[in-house]
């Protein structure tokens, strides 16, 4: 189907959406709350969300060319489908406000220190809206292009950091006495994997559905390994104690890279990383547009895009005026995200199986 996306696009969609904002802050979280064994917490969380992603892709493949809102009407009826859509919309508005708040913070601290955040928010939302207006296929292609550049740059940068960092800072890798702490650390890592629920608005063709599900599963596991690589190399560069003092620990670690070829290696990485962050927020914007377009099907797509952008802008600017906004987001979003990523898709899958609407994957 022309409106479906490929398995390769699934990989880049997950990579950029999941790492959009947390990639720059996750080293601090791990260093501060879990310690050198944080890699295990990250991989356990990755395994959980890999299963969640596989369930969503399984459902999308079972109903070719449909989004979650469309096939949920067949499974639980129109009323419940609309309730689910409203919940997803509210959730995506919250996570978009969080992402834009992070984006504005990065822009102000690293690029435009004298520019007010509200101005950067307005400009950013306009850019996101222009991309989201193109539809799921165009956005998926955009992710594919940006994703290739992003992953090559990121892996290269962190290999350099691995060579220049101090291995002693991430030792010991594991302590059996701290296993309960590592398991409890899963809670701290939940935020890093929010984003798999964006898959609910990307239709699949239904062909080779088993391969698509495996692709989604392995993609999230790869992202877990990617996070571990980033966290470990950042701590090696900064030290376990210093990493706890920086909100954007990744940026600080990149600044310490000694590269004789590029004097400001951090500028290159930040530019590419910023493009990846933009792509991630575009995915959230697109999800809002797709759900809203199906709820308000009589409205034109441009009207929906403008309406969503207006609400996103107002909500983001309002949260910038709230001092503990980040703390509130970080406590509410993981719970709300689990409902979107796990509870709703899994419940729909079970009901669909009972009703005989889902066949054995090919």
Image (spheres, rainbow, N blue to C red):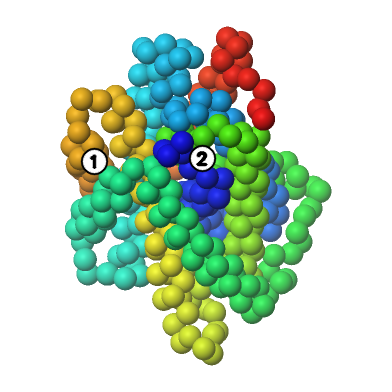
Residue pictured at 45% horizontal, 14% vertical: 74
Q: Please indicate, yes or no, whether residue 331 appears anywhere in the rendered image.
A: no
Element marked by disc 1: helix
- Split into 4 quadrants, where in the image is the C terminus? top right
What residue occupies the far front of the structure in this picture? 1
Give the number of marks: 2
Q: Please indicate, yes or no, whether residue 65 appears anywhere in the rendered image.
A: yes
Residue 263 location (% of width, % of height): 46, 87
In this rendering, the answer to whether 206 lies above or below 97 is: above
Q: Nearer the viewer, residue 28 or 102?
A: 102
In this rendering, the answer to whether 139 lies above or below 165 is: above
Residue 163 location (% of width, % of height): 67, 77
Crowding at dot 2, Cα within 10 Å, few <14 / some 14-19 / many 20+, comes out as many
Residue pictured at 34% horizontal, 34% vertical: 290
| Tag 2 residue | 196
Q: Is residue 259 left or right of residue 320?
A: right
Report, in whole angstroms, how far the alpha carbon at label 1 lies from the one at label 2: 22 Å
Residue 333 location (% of width, % of height): 44, 37
Q: Nearer the viewer, residue 216 or 274?
A: 216
In this rendering, the answer to whether 305 lies above or below 28 is: above
Q: Assess whether mark 2 and mark 1 are in contact (beta carbons under 8 angstroms).
A: no
| Tag 1 residue | 305
Residue pictured at 40% horizontal, 69% vertical: 271
Question: Which numbered disc flags the more N-terminal residue, 1 or 2?
Answer: 2
Residue 190 location (% of width, % of height): 55, 42
Crowding at dot 1, Cα within 10 Å, few <14 / some 14-19 / many 20+, comes out as many
Residue pictured at 26% horizontal, 48% vertical: 129
Q: Nearer the viewer, residue 141 or 270?
A: 141
Element marked by disc 2: helix
């Amino acid at each position: 189907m022309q409106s479906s996306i490929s398995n390769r696009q699934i990989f880049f969609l997950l990579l950029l959406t999941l790492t959009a904002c947390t990639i720059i802050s996750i080293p601090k979280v791990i260093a501060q709350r879990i310690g050198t064994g944080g890699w295990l917490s990250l991989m356990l969380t990755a395994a959980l969300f890999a299963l969640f992603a596989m369930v969503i892709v399984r459902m999308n493949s079972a109903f070719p060319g449909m989004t979650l809102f469309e096939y949920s009407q067949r499974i639980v009826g129109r009323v419940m489908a609309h309730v689910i859509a409203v919940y997803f919309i509210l959730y995506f508005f919250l996570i978009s406000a969080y992402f834009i708040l992070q984006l504005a913070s990065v822009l102000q601290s690293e690029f435009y220190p004298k520019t007010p955040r509200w101005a950067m928010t307005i400009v950013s939302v306009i850019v996101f809206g222009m991309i989201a207006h193109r539809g799921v296929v165009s956005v998926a292609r955009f992710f594919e292009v940006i994703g290739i550049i992003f992953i090559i740059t990121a892996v290269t940068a962190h290999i350099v950091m691995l060579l220049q960092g101090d291995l002693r800072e991430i030792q010991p890798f594991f302590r059996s006495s701290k296993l309960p702490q590592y398991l409890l650390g899963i809670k701290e890592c939940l935020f890093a994997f929010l984003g798999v629920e964006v898959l609910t608005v990307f239709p699949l063709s239904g062909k080779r559905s088993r391969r698509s599900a495996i692709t989604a599963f392995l993609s999230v596991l790869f992202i877990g390994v990617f996070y571990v690589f980033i966290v470990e190399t950042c701590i090696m560069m900064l030290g376990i104690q210093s990493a706890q003092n920086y909100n954007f620990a990744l940026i600080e670690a990149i600044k310490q890279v000694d590269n004789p070829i590029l004097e400001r290696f951090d500028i290159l990485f930040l530019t590419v990383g910023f493009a990846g962050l933009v792509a991630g927020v575009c995915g959230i914007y697109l999800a809002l547009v797709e759900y809203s377009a199906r709820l308000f099907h009589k409205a034109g797509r441009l009207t929906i895009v403008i309406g969503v952008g207006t609400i996103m802008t107002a909500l983001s600017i309002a949260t910038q005026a709230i001092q503990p906004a980040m703390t509130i987001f970080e406590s509410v979003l993981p719970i709300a995200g689990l409902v979107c990523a796990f509870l709703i898709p899994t419940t729909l899958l079970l009901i669909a199986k009972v009703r005989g609407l889902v066949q054995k994957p090919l």
